[in-house]
Structure formats: C-alpha cells, structure tokens
Image (cartoon, helix red, strand yellow):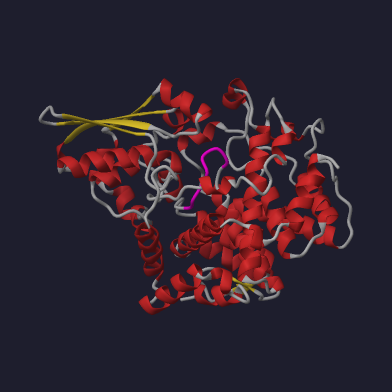
Amino acid sequence: MGETEVLADYVANAKYEDLPANVVNHAKKALADTIACGLGGRKTPEVDILIDIMKEIGGKPEATVIGDKTKLSFMQAAQVNRVMTNMLDYDDDLIKVGHMSTVLVPVALAVGEHVDASGKETLNALVHGYEVITRIKDAVYPSEEVFWKTFERVDSGIHLGVTIVAGKLMGLNSGQMADALGLTGNMRAWRITRPEWAKKGMPPWMKVTGGDITIPGMHAVMLAKRGFPGDRGMLDQGRGYEFSVGSDRYDATKLTKTLGKQYRMLDIGFKFYSACRWTSSTLDAVATIKSENTLKAEDVEQVIVKVQKLVADNFAIYEPEYMIQAQFSIPYVVSMILLGEPTGPNWYTEEKFKNPKVRELQHKVKLEEDPVATKKIYAEHKATSTVEITMKNGKCFTKHVEYPKGEPENPFTEQDHLDKFTNMASWLGMKRSQIDELIQTLKSLEKLGTISELTRLLVP
C-alpha cells in the first residue's frame, strides 16, 4: 500500500478507546470553544442572510444551526455553522496549519446528527480529522524561499480533514476512506494565492463563501460509501499533490510516521481576542503595558508594532469600514485594547468604526517589519511581536511577546475557557441555567449516547 492507503486504513480503523486522555480533553475544549464562537457569531447579518438562503433552497430539517431554532439538512447546517463559527475570528487555530476547528466541528456536529452518532464517535472522528490535516501540512511544508513566494500558508489540506470526519461518522472502511480522499482532492484541486486586496483587509465575501470548504469532503464520502472509486494514491510520494498548494518539497513519509503515538492537535491554541491570530501577540503586549502602567489612551503619543513581514505588509489597515476588515487591522484592534473595550462582538459595531476618537487613535499605531520575527514565523512557527508605546510626556514602554495567551506554551486556564464560553452565550441571550447545562454536557461529551443530546442545547 502507498502512503494514502496506509493513512486511510489507520484512520478508518482507529478506535476512541485508544486515544490518550489529554487528546480527548483537548478535543473537547476545541469543540466547546468552536461552539462558543458560533454562539457569538450568530447575531451577525452575514449569518442571517446565509440562513435565509438555505431556507429558500429547502431541504430535510435534520441538523441544528448553532444559536437558532432553524433546522437544515446536514450539509446546509455544516456550511452555515462553519461560517458562523469563524465570523468573529475568535476561533482556535494552529499557526502552521490554520483554522481546523471552525471547519471540522460543524461537520462533526451536522453529520453526527445525521447518523445519530454518540459523543465518543464524534470525538474520535474529530481527533482523526485534525490528525490527517496536520500530517498533510507537515508533508508539504516548503523551503523558506517558496514559503514566501507561492506557498498557500492558510488552511490548505483542511478540506481533506472534512473527508476524514465525515467518513469516520458514516462508517467508511479502509478502501472507501482512500477513495473518498482521492475524490475530495479532485473536487477541490485549486489553490488560493495571496492577492493584492489582502493589504486592504479581507473583503466582506471572504468568510461567507468559505462555507463551501465543507461540501467536497462530505460529497466524496457519500460517493465512496456507494462504491464510487477515487484516486487511492493521491497523497503518495511522486504523485504531485504538493503542486496544489504551491510547495517545492514533499515528504509523504510524514503522513504515516508515528501514527497513533503523536497527536499534533495538542498544539492547537485558543484565542483570547476576537481578531486574526497574528494580532494576538501584539494585543497581549499592549494590554500588559496598559495594565502595568495604568496608561490612558488619550495620553498616548505613538505606538510602534514590530512584527513579521506578512503582518507588517498586510495589517496596517486604518479606519476599517466593516467587521472582517477590522479583524485584520492592527491599528484598530490595538485601539480597542487601549480604550479598554471588552473583546468579542462588542469590538465591531458601526458606532466604534465611525467614532472620531477611535479613528484618531488608530493613526498613532505604526507597523514595522522585525526581521527576527519574520525568520521565526517560518522556522519556529511563532507569531511574535514587540510593542513600543511612547506617551505625550516622553515616557516610553516596551514589551515583547513570544507566545500570546491561549497558545500551548501560555495556555488558557479553565476559567478562561469558561469565561469565553459564558460571554458568547450571554451575548446571544442564553439564560444562565441553559449555559450551565451546556457546559456540563460538553465536559462529559464522551458519555452521550447521541450527539443530539448536545445539539438540542445549542438553541436559546
């Protein structure tokens, strides 16, 4: 068997009982965090529009929309929830890999409802979806020269994680799983490059159309389950998969090495701030300087932010006009920290975008490339930041952050997880009794006979 079939055989037969306790615990945290992001994202107009479209299309009402009484077909629910959980840019990620949970968790919940999966089956599928994505990303990781020129650095390979999650829950055998991987690759054999509009912030359509990443994998699983053949060697060495993500270096042995012994999903970090993860170190630095020196925003003369090249080139966005653009604007989110605004949906209101004080403060924030930080993002996968704040009285404060709050090296406390979840559920309007029941259900997810015992609690 080639590497693709070895990997497919492993994940098709992998049992929940073989998962280490720390892996199960981290998967439950990732699932809960993603649901929290969905509850917070439900009140955005983009999600309202998407739900209305799905209602107009119609379908079997079988799967839950997070934070809404609407039920949709499982494919529609996966699409809507994928968009919803990413809208606030509050969702977890792994810097080298991208946002996995905001794709895999909606698929696991929707397909889980469709097939009446248990809590254990849902967690098992989710863990192995993460496992395949991280291994693919390790296998295709390019040379440094290509990394900066053509490599698709964000989310590549995540659509194949959808295949694994859906395939596990729908009971594919080894051969069918290999078929499904090959079919998914053919359905989505294209690559996004970083266009010029990135310098102006993500456009409004970027996240809404992103829901389509869930569809190829689910389609492929349904085809494979019915005996439709796929390319069972798609990921094998020498087959050229790396060209689809713009890599010049591919090592398929990384797909199968240490299977069942090493779980890269343990490196997933959680976000303390509702903005792109590459802003987190900067925001931690600003927050620390502010709290340790009791600074007032009106006394700030200038803020210099020294970061890696991609951030310096693309995140110097001033006076953003809408939420998605603001999530990639370091001047804007730094202003929110300096003004003491609580993170979450509260940051992205029309009133704040147009507030003259906010707009004036943004222009005091300047970005510079730090060559050391640029080296670290490639070699060490660290999004570091150094912040210098100069006050009107001439005082200067400096803070460097290697690992922002939420990364495995600077982890959330249990209270951090609870606070984030409670804040997002409360923002949506959930009652405290329902929030408490939902939290307890998530903590004991592996005991659920059916995932519907969880999803019924996602509706206020």
Q: Determine which quarter of the picture holds residue 125.
A: bottom right
Question: Farthest residue in the left direction?
Answer: 393
Image x and y of residue 178, in percent: 81, 50
Q: Say how many tags the image has.
A: 0
The residue sitting at 66% across, 55% down in the picture is 214
> Is 199 rendered above or below residue 260?
above
- Residue 170 in picture, x, y percent from top left: 75, 65
Task: Give 412 or 142, whichever is nearer the viewer.
Answer: 412
Nearest the eye: 442 or 14: 14
Q: Nearer the viewer, residue 148 or 331?
A: 148
Left or right of 231: which side holds 134? left
Q: Main secondary structure of the magenta part?
A: loop
Does the magenta-highlighted stretch encompass residue 257? no
Residue 134 showing in the rendered view: yes
Q: Nearer the viewer, residue 456 or 429?
A: 456
Where is residue 195? Give x, y as percent.
Answer: 57, 33
- Taking the spot 72% from the left edge, 41% from the top edge, the residue there is 256
Q: What stretch of residues is rendered in magenta?
A: 91-97
